[in-house]
Image (cartoon, rainbow, N blue to C red):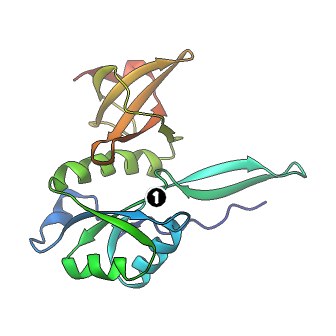
Amino acid sequence: MPILKKDTDVNPPSLLDSRSLSFPSRRWFVLYTKPSQDKVLLRRLLSGGKSFCGLLVANRSRMPAGRMKTTWEPLFPGYVFLHGTQEARYDAVCTRCVQQVLDVFDGESLRCDLKRIHDAIVNGLQVQRAESIEKGQRVRVLAGPLRGHTGILLFRKGECRLVLSLSFIQQSAMVEIDSSLVEAA
């Protein structure tokens, strides 16, 4: 079965670059959505020209007939990250997809966390949600698609994994990585 088209999960594409934060009237908000409303909210924000990040990842599963099906699902279900004015926040709430809005006081930290995870997704790494923020050795990636990023190195089931934390919502994602590509941070 063909891969379904991926919804836009970052708008504009340059949103997570450091130069995108040069608008003093804009700030970050975390939108906690009603159940199963993440992608609906992303589509409505896109049609309204809002700046947002949703972090969608491919989920492959086998159908009863044996075929493989790929769907795009939120890495962190229930969370959409909005970068905009108070008016954009109000417009998002008016979509009736939002259950709660959290104000972000350290927008730069949130942007950096989102960029780390987004870079892993865009570079084709298999990103999975981690159960919790793990304890391990803090490392910096020396080479590869995540070069320059930091995270926590774990060894699980004989595999080396890099945990990328999204501190504001206290959740994490992880990717497999070769331990020779990292150094202690």
Residue 152 occupies quadrant: top left
Quarter of the image with the N terminus is: bottom right
Looking at the image, which is closer to me, 154 or 124? 154
Name the side, left or right, on which 117 lies relative to 38.
left
Residue 137 occupies quadrant: top left
Q: Position of residue 160 (x, y in %)?
A: 47, 21
Q: Residue at x 29, y 46 (%)?
A: 113
Q: Is residue 125 above or below residue 104?
A: above
Can you see residue 12? Answer: no
Q: As shown in the figure, which amino acid type bears the numbered disc 1? A: Gly
Residue occupying the far left of the picture:
24
Label 1: few (<14), some (14–19) or many (≥20) C-alpha neighbours in 10 Å: some
Q: Is residue 40 above or below residue 29?
A: below
- Quickly name the residue at label 1: 78
Q: Position of residue 133 (x, y in %)?
A: 37, 32
Q: Is residue 122 above or below residue 156?
A: below
Looking at the image, which is closer to me, 95 or 165? 95
Name the side, left or right, on which 70 lies relative to 91.
right
Total number of numbered labels?
Answer: 1
Q: Determine whether the residue tagged by mark 1 lies in a helix, strand or loop.
A: loop
Q: Residue at x 61, y 68 (%)?
A: 5
Q: Residue at x 42, y 61 (%)?
A: 54
Q: Is residue 18 above or below residue 163?
A: below
Q: Position of residue 11 (x, y in %)?
A: 36, 70
